Image: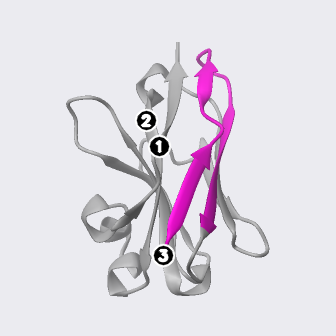
Amino acid sequence: HVQLVESGGGSVEPGGSLRLSCAASGFSASTYCMGWFRQVPGKQREGVAAMDSDGYSTYARSVEGRFRISQDSAKSTLDLQMNSLKPEDTAIYYCAADPSGSWCRTQSLILSQRYYHNWGQGTQVTVS
């Protein structure tokens, strides 16, 4: 079965950087879309960045230009490099994956949490 484990969260001052990693196992990343989401207490989970099975990346408007998603050559990890962090980036960050389909080739859908059914347990990011 699919397993996703996040790491790399922590506390950083505004303007600082963090790199999150998601260790993936139990599936072939070449046939999955994967993404990073974040959630603040009391608010709906929000798509941050995602990558389709062809390696094409999509970013939320709020993080584009500051965050970058990437995979290793074996596609066993999904990283999120976060630069120029802002207090509003504070959240629990989750790694997610689901079998590829037309939804993950649509920019407005690939960042929608409803299309993902495999989730990690999350890692806290605090910017203050």
Q: Which residue is mark 2?
A: 92
Which picture quadrant has residue 101?
A: bottom left
**Earlier along the polypeptide chain: callout 2 or callout 3?**
3
Residue 89 forms part of the magenta stretch? no
Element under disc 2: strand
Residue 12 forms part of the magenta stretch? yes
Q: Are marks 1 and 2 in contact (CB under 8 Å)?
A: yes
Q: Which residue is mark 3?
A: 1
Whether residue 90 is visible, yes or no, is yes
Instruction: Judge depth for marks 2 and 3 and give the one in front.
Output: 3
Q: Which residue is mark 1?
A: 122
Percent x, y of residue 23: 64, 59
Q: Distance of mark 2 from mark 3, alpha carbons? A: 23 Å
Magenta span: 1-24
Q: Distance of mark 1 from mark 2, alpha carbons? A: 6 Å
Please indicate whether residue 121 sits to the left or right of residue 39 in the image: right
**Earlier along the polypeptide chain: callout 1 or callout 2?**
2
Element under disc 3: loop
